[in-house]
Amino acid sequence: MGFWSAVKVTLKNRRFWLWQLAGVVIYGIPAAIRFATGSVAIPILNFPGFWIGHYIPGNMLEKVLVNAFFPGGAGGVAGEIFFRNYKGEAVEGKGKYLSRLGGAMLQTGAWSAFQMWGFSLMLIGPWGSGEFGNIFEHWTVFPFNFTLAAFSIFTPDVVYFLKSLLAKSRGKLSGRSSKS
């Protein structure tokens, strides 16, 4: 299949949109909490609570959890679906993870460009002023985001593993075998 045909088929894929939309919702939850409370700090997710140098944010736990799904995890799934369509066969093994890595890096790059553009607009949230009150991320966090994106290629595997465990548990609890 050609490049543009693979793009069109990818954009019509239900799994692609499920990961994109779920990822955006997961990414948006902490932002919504910040606007609702008027505070940058979210007690559970604000670990370690202080910046480590200029590159590791004070809300590192939040970043790890959120970036596993968007943009990294969703981009990884997009890359996998695209390359499956482009090659015309399922991508497996090392190829699957390389396609996910390419998708995660591409989507993280696009998201970082959007964040950089947004930061330049200096849109201030209800919690502060100046650079510290900007609703968009500062560029110094981008290397950390790309590192998280590289590890987020495993997020779909973890999610599908947990989904299968829940399905087996539900089958056992209801007295049925999960194979029926």
Image (cartoon, grey):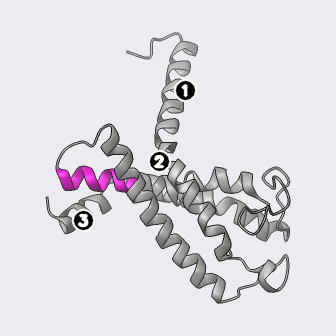
- Residue at 76 percent of width and 84 percent of height: 124
Whichever of callouts 3 and 1 sits on the residue coming sooner in the sequence is 3
| Residue 57 horizontal side relative to residue 127, left or right | left
Mark 2: few, some, or many residues within 10 Å (few <14, many ≥20)? many
Q: Can I make out residue 14 in this image?
A: no
Nearer the observer, 81 or 105: 105
In magenta segment, residue 80: yes
Per the rendered image, the range of residues in magenta is 77-87
- Residue at 29 percent of width and 59 percent of height: 10
**Quarter of the image that includes the C terminus:** top left
* Residue that label 1 marks: 166
| Residue 14 horizontal side relative to residue 124, left or right | left
Q: Amino acid at mark 2?
A: Ile
- Residue at 81 percent of width and 52 percent of height: 47
Q: Amino acid at mark 1?
A: Leu
In magenta segment, residue 86: yes
Mark 1: few, some, or many residues within 10 Å (few <14, many ≥20)? few
Mark whose residue sits in front, 1 or 2: 2
**Is residue 39 positioned above or below 179 on the image?**
below
Q: Does the CB distance between marks 3 and 1 fall below 8 Å? A: no
| Residue 88 horizontal side relative to residue 153, left or right | left
* Residue that label 2 marks: 153
Please identify the quarter of the rendering in which residue 49 is found.
Answer: bottom right
Helix, strand or loop at mark 3: helix
Inter-mark Cα distance, 3 to 2: 23 Å
| Residue 178 horizontal side relative to residue 39, left or right | left
* Residue that label 3 marks: 8
Q: Does the CB distance between marks 1 and 2 fall below 8 Å? A: no
Q: Does the CB distance between marks 3 and 2 fall below 8 Å? A: no
Helix, strand or loop at mark 2: helix
